[in-house]
Image (cartoon, coloured by chain):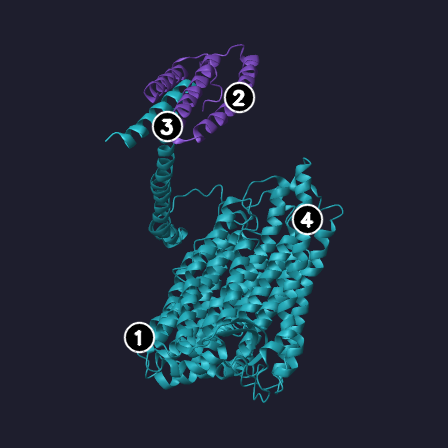
């Protein structure tokens, strides 16, 4: 079981990381972050069979944080969009230096 | 530490704690003995009160002028002619008022002391303890003896006259209250100097009069040259002050006390096996005295000090402050007597100063500069007297000089005041102090001419005026001590004697030249100016007349037995000498023990009467000869006088190049060093370090700022790389 689950989790996490690094669209980056979180969730669930129930417990925490993050993050993106008329993050460098 | 003693005091020393509670209450406890001084602290305090009152008025007046300037007017816009403001009316009464009150108190005390036959100094106080350490206690107390009494009378008496004169002289000056505030403050510090019961308190007065001198020289501070003259006086005096301080340290180190009573009691024991030490201490005192009393080579500040108002020159730079050096030496006579080498130095410097200054005075054109060099020369005479151990003669000449030199300065002030007014009225730009612009003023200012004529004869040493007796006594003692059997420096004393005689004749010449150039001959004023020249108002004339009377009669203070025939026995025999005996006898005894008795004839023979007659005849001959020759000479005005000077005349006009030498040897090197410190040390080294540190910080900031692209993706990428690096470092072997 673990032999499939952990590589899959790692692959999903890597894809998510790559997405955060290379994409410029804030919504897409956001999705990629969700992907990373869920990759971690997958690893937690898979490992919980051997290590204990705490793994599944942590998944709920992660999901809660992800939900909160989605709410706050989307609110920020909308607010920024209202000012800039775009969600391309490479245009958001007003606070540089 | 014995800080107080009175003649035959039976009262125990007052507990300082209780005496500090009340100044007045402490007095009666102290002097249970023969003579009780009457409110001596009040004499000192009165001028201080005058300073406070006038100072407040000056502040009010300055605030108003500042407001007037801000409102678009000028400083002078508070009109002084129509309706003087209160701030300019009250100082007229406060300034001279406190002085006259102090003088009257001084006379009361003098009369008391006169009747008391005092042999020991009376120490009034201590009023409070200034400093108390385990080994040193300095009390604030007043040292009242015959010497300080004479000084107190001169300072308050001549000071009163000059304050009154100032009322007329400074009438139209916008800084009138400030002037009187400074002048009162000066008298306060001068009284602290002469009355303080120890070297530290004397030093307070010493520095205080220096400060007031600086303030009053630079009184018209808007004029750069005058402000600079004030600074020069202050800086040159610092050199002397450092000598005074070191001398105090030496005394404390060896005697353990600094009040006069303890120092003079302990001096002989403390220095008996180490004469080099007392020589050093007295030489350091001499350095201080030379600075304050403008002796070569520290005399350069005094002629420049003439930038101050003329009554200031009369009071501070002729009659009182500059004689403080003579006072210090006379006060410390018990120390100087232990150091014959120091005495010889004092006499030598005095003789050199007298001669050099007199020669410079021959070729000066500024009337105040002539008088300034004359003052330096006369101070040299006093130092010569103190140096040969004739302290009475030094103090005697100090007193008579205060009379006739104050008179000369005030007379010159009256002339300048009148000419300044005349030039102002006619819009002329001519210098009101340059004697080349004067001439023939006798007809216009008869009173001023008469009193200055008296003072000129007095300073020239013509019988029977004050200067005749005092100067003759100095010359006589220089010659008489040359013949003392045990005098190791006898041949030097002969030189001093000859120099003093020659200087006396030079004095007669340059003073006659001053009189002729100012009052006689063809008038070099324009017709328009002539109409405005006249004698001063009475408020200025009255002090002149009083001083003239004193200049005539002052010599009667100390007529020696051999000269009594000259005054037909009218004067008490050597009154001042006997009066000062309690102060000077210690030094006199040591001197006689070391050198033997002074000779009864001059180095080339002849007694005191002979030489007195020779000198007065010579002085009269010089005055008469100079008068006859110079009166016919046609002087040109300063503007027309463009002849190049050569040789000796140039050297004298340039004051023997002292200022130039100091400029090369001191001023320029100091300026160069300062510029080097400024440009190199401060500008390059220190600023360099500071700027380098700042540049490094900026470089570091700029470099690291490159990492902040502002792109979230970059940050995420670097973060991921970082995590990978950490994980790799942890898990990879």
- Residues at marks 2 and 1 touching, judged by CB atoms closer than 8 Å: no
Percent of width and height locating residue B11: 60, 87
Which is more toward the observer, A66 or B468?
A66
- Residues at marks 3 and 4 touching, judged by CB atoms closer than 8 Å: no
Label 3 Cα crowd, 10 Å radius (few <14 / some 14-19 / many 20+): few
The quarter holding residue B691 reads top left
Please state the chain letter of the residue tagged with numbered disc 4 in the rendered image: B
Residue B711 seen from this side: no
Look at mark 1 in the image and give the residue it sits on: B491
| Foreground: disc 2 or disc 3 | 2
Label 1 Cα crowd, 10 Å radius (few <14 / some 14-19 / many 20+): few
First in sequence, mark 3 or 4: give its number: 4
| Foreground: disc 3 or disc 4 | 3
Q: Which chain wears purple?
A: A
Report which colour depicts chain B: cyan
Percent of width and height locating residue B697: 38, 34
Residue B316 seen from this side: yes
Look at mark 3 in the image and give the residue it sits on: B704
Percent of width and height locating residue B489: 31, 76
Label 4 Cα crowd, 10 Å radius (few <14 / some 14-19 / many 20+): many
Look at mark 2 in the image and give the residue it sits on: A67
Which is more toward the observer, B334 or B495?
B334
Q: CA distance from mark 3 to mark 1?
A: 86 Å
| Foreground: disc 1 or disc 4 | 4
First in sequence, mark 1 or 4: give its number: 4
Which is more toward the observer, B338 or B656?
B338
- Residue at point 37%, 65% (across, down): B352
């Amino acid at each position: 079981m673990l032999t499939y689950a952990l590589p899959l989790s790692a692959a999903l996490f890597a894809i998510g990381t790559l997405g955060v690094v290379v994409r410029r669209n804030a919504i897409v980056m956001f999705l990629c972050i969700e992907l990373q979180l869920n990759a971690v969730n997958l690893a937690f669930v898979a490992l919980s069979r051997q290590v204990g129930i705490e793994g599944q417990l942590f998944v709920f925490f992660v999901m809660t944080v992800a939900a909160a993050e989605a709410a706050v993050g989307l609110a920020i993106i909308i607010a920024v969009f209202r000012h800039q008329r775009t969600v391309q993050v490479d245009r958001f460098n007003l606070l540089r230096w | 530490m014995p800080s107080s003693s009175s003649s035959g005091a039976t009262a125990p020393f007052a507990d300082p704690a209780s005496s500090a509670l009340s100044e007045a209450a402490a007095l009666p406890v102290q002097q249970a003995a023969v003579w009780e001084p009457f409110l001596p602290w009040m004499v000192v305090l009165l001028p201080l009160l005058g300073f406070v009152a006038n100072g407040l008025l000056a502040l009010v007046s300055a605030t108003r002028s500042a407001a007037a300037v801000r409102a678009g007017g000028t400083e002078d816009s508070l009109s002084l002619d129509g309706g003087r403001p209160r701030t300019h009316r009250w100082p007229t009464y406060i300034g001279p008022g406190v002085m006259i009150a102090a003088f009257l108190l001084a006379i009361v005390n003098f009369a008391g002391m006169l009747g008391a036959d005092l042999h020991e100094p009376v120490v009034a106080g201590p009023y409070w303890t200034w400093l108390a350490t385990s080994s040193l206690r300095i009390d604030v107390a007043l040292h009242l003896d015959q010497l300080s009494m004479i000084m107190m009378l001169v300072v308050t008496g001549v000071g009163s006259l000059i304050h009154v004169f100032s009322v007329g002289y400074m009438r139209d000056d916008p800084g009138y209250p400030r002037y009187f505030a400074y002048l009162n403050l000066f008298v306060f510090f001068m009284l602290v100097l002469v009355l303080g019961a120890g070297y530290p308190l004397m030093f307070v007065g010493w520095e205080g009069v220096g400060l007031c001198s600086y303030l009053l020289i630079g009184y018209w501070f808007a004029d750069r040259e005058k402000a600079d003259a004030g600074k020069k006086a202050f800086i040159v005096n610092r050199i002397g002050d450092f000598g005074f301080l070191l001398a105090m340290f030496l005394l404390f180190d060896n005697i353990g006390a600094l009040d006069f009573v303890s120092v003079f009691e302990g001096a002989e024991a403390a220095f008996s096996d180490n004469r080099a030490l007392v020589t050093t201490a007295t030489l350091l005192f001499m350095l201080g005295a030379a600075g304050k009393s403008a002796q070569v080579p520290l005399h350069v500040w005094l002629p420049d000090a003439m930038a101050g108002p003329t009554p200031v020159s009369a009071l501070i730079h002729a009659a009182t402050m500059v004689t403080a050096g003579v006072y210090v030496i006379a006060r410390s006579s018990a120390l100087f007597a232990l150091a014959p080498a120091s005495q010889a130095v004092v006499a030598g410097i005095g003789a050199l100063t007298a001669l050099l200054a007199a020669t410079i005075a021959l070729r000066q054109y500024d009337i105040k500069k002539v008088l300034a060099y004359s003052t330096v020369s006369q101070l040299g005479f006093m130092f010569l007297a103190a140096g040969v151990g004739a302290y009475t003669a030094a103090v005697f000449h100090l007193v008579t000089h205060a009379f006739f030199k104050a008179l000369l300065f005030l007379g010159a002030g009256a002339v300048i005041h009148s000419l300044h007014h005349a030039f102002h009225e006619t819009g002329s730009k001519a210098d009101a102090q340059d004697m080349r612009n004067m001439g023939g003023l006798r007809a216009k200012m008869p009173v001023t001419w008469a009193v200055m004529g008296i003072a000129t004869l007095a300073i020239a040493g013509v019988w029977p005026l004050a200067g005749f007796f005092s100067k003759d006594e100095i010359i006589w003692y220089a010659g008489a001590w040359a013949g003392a059997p045990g005098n190791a420096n006898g041949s030097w004393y002969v030189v001093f004697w000859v120099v003093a005689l020659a200087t006396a004749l030079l004095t007669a010449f340059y003073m006659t030249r001053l009189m002729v150039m100012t009052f006689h001959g063809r008038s070099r004023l324009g017709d328009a100016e002539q109409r405005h020249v006249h004698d001063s108002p009475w408020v200025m004339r009255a002090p002149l007349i009083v001083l003239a009377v004193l200049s005539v009669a002052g010599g009667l203070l100390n007529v020696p037995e051999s000269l009594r025939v000259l005054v037909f026995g009218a004067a008490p025999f050597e009154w001042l000498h006997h009066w000062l005996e309690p102060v000077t006898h210690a030094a006199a005894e040591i001197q006689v023990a070391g050198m033997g008795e002074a000779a009864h004839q001059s180095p080339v023979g002849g007694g005191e009467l002979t030489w007195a007659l020779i000198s007065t005849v010579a002085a009269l001959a010089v005055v008469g000869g100079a008068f006859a020759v110079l009166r016919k000479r046609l002087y040109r005005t300063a503007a027309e006088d463009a002849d190049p000077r050569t040789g000796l005349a140039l050297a004298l006009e340039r004051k023997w190049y002292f200022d130039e030498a100091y400029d090369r040897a001191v001023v320029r090197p100091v300026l160069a060093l300062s510029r080097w410190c400024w440009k190199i040390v401060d500008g390059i080294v220190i600023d360099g370090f500071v700027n380098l540190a700042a540049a490094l910080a900026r470089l570091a900031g700029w470099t690291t700022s490159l990492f902040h692209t502002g792109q979230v993706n970059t940050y995420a990428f670097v973060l991921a790389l970082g995590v990978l690096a950490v994980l790799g470092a942890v898990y990879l072997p």
